[in-house]
Image (cartoon, rainbow, N blue to C red):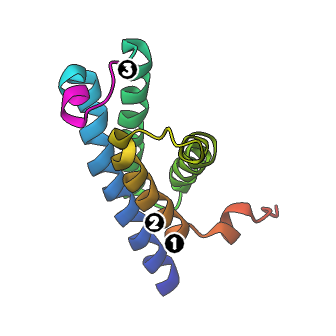
Amino acid sequence: MLEKIDLELKLKIMYIYTIIITVIFGLGILIAPYMMISMFGWPKQDPIVLGITGSIYLSFTLLSILGLRNPIKFMPILLMQLCYKVIWFIAVFLPLLIIGQFPLYAILHVVIFGTFIIGDIIVLPFSDLIAKKSD
């Protein structure tokens, strides 16, 4: 019982962290995209792609709010977050870093994504997530 409470508390901390970061970026991108581009030194971007990014971030906000009510049931949200960030590190960050073309304006993304990866790895009970459910 204590382990379940401890797990729920750790999950809630990750949901709160997700809510804080994704609401800032999600709403910022959707409501004031040019301000976000200027503030973070991003290059001008396609408004459709930028809007998709903002919408996805805001979706993580909304689903993480639900996760606060039922942390264990919404663990796949954190798993999805972990997966896409690890894939981004492998498929985008590392190749650009290796060829010396990783832009300085994206360092904040690396730091934020890194904190999410570490946090998700710490809190997610992988044995429970991949265990086969017996009927």
Distance between the Cα atoms at labels 2 and 1? 5 Å
**SS category of the residue bearing label 3:** helix
- Quarter of the rendering containing residue 111: bottom left
Res 51 label? 3
Distance between the Cα atoms at labels 1 and 3? 31 Å
Residue identified by numbered label 1: 122
Disc 1: CA contacts within 10 A as few (<14), some (14-19) or many (>=20): few
Q: Earlier in the sequence, mark 1 or mark 3?
A: 3
Q: Earlier in the sequence, mark 3 or mark 2?
A: 3
**SS category of the residue bearing label 1:** helix
Q: Which residues are magenta?
A: 36-44
| Quadrant that contains the C terminus | bottom right
Residue at x-position 57% and y-position 39%: 92
Residue 1 can be seen in this image: no
User: Quick check: marks 1 and 3 in contact, CB under 8 Å?
Assistant: no
Residue 114 can be seen in this image: yes
Instruction: Give the camera-side residue of 94 and 69.
Output: 94
Res 119 label? 2
Instruction: Give the camera-side residue of 48 and 89.
Output: 89
- Quarter of the rendering containing residue 17: bottom left
102 left or right, relative to 27: right
User: Quick check: marks 2 and 1 in contact, CB under 8 Å?
Assistant: yes
Disc 2: CA contacts within 10 A as few (<14), some (14-19) or many (>=20): some
Residue at x-position 51% and y-position 72%: 122
